[in-house]
Image: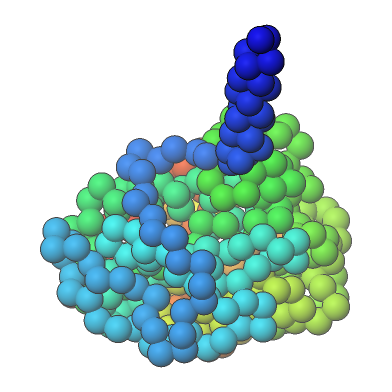
Amino acid sequence: MRIQPIFITLFTLLLALTACSSSPQSTTEAVVPTRLELAVLPTDTPLPATATAVPPIPATATSTPTPEPTATATPTATPTATAVPFGAITTIGYSAGARPIESYQFGNGATNIILIGGIHGGYEWNSILIAYEFIDYILENPDIIPETITLHIIPSANPDGQFKVTGVNGRFRESDVSTNTVPGRFNDNNVDLNRNWDCNWQPTGIWRDQTVSAGPHPFSEPENIALRDFIVPRNPAVTIFYHSAFNAIFMSGCPAIGPRTRALAELYATAANYPTYEEFPSYPITGDAGDWLTTQNIPSITVELSTHFSLDWTRNLNGLLAVLEHYGQ
């Protein structure tokens, strides 16, 4: 009879169709490699209030793990942590466009140092990439973090603005950057985040020869709420914002520059070979992040890279190493 071969053929075809329907669908995700891949452990569940955001540090690292107090809760997000070598990645909040703002932590010392890039998003995309270069360097050279220091690096404080210019969430390549970077200065609410802090705030700010939105009121933007509520409870000895492009160090103050801010600026500028300024000379700045932090007795400086594409890598590495050495004593 010929029924059996036909039955076998149909049965074989049925098995093939079943296998195809049960196999997982492939997904594609843009992944930008780093010089040293981060061995991340997935921990998407928010940490309990008493938990530490930092896992035990491997024996090869220079510091000993100690719990760190949980930061004040932010209106935008509950911080969540993902383990990496020598520290953790923490989502500290979300942008107006619901993109995560991440902080990379290294070390567990009592003295906090915070580096922040990209508050002007894709318009100053090199201020984001230099932060990632610092992360790469520390992963390859963990011994540079003194035992007394906890270093936090927030590469992209304005992920909406970054995405407008690069089309990438998270780490990107220079080749991803579009030719028109101006829209990337603002978040998805079209607010200039560095005009939205509560120091001399005005409804509109000045940028070059034009006015920009500073938001309906100080701290109206979720990015700045997340930064504020992350930074202030840690009472950092050093806060450094990276911008471009003026080739200088600017001292923060609202209204006056404090001695600790001045000492920080001179230390970094000497090591990195930048000139220092007490005020931005080109136009008035209102609602500035660093200026507001000084009202909280937190020293803060702004590093302006020399161009809109250069990282000034050797200079800024020297500046960071000088800060770690000085404040790690």
Question: Considering depth in this image, is 304 or 78 the residue closer to the camera?
Answer: 78
Residue shown at the point (63%, 13%) measured from the top left: 5
Residue shown at the point (52%, 39%) measured from the top left: 31
Question: Considering depth in this image, is 209 or 238 the residue closer to the camera?
Answer: 238
Name the spot of residue 177 as percent of width and height, x first.
Answer: 65, 36
- Quadrant of residue 174 in the image? top right
Q: Is residue 120 visible?
A: no
Q: Locate residue 77 relative to residue 318 in the image: left or right.
A: right
Q: Is residue 204 visible?
A: yes
Locate the N terminus by quadrant. Answer: top right
Name the spot of residue 102 as percent of width and height, x first.
Answer: 52, 63
Locate the C terminus by quadrant. Answer: bottom left
Name the spot of residue 105 as percent of width and height, x first.
Answer: 38, 66
Residue shown at the point (82%, 64%) measured from the top left: 189
Is 212 located above or below residue 287 in the figure? Answer: above
Residue shown at the point (23%, 67%) measured from the top left: 57
Name the spot of residue 120 as percent of width and height, x first.
Answer: 66, 56
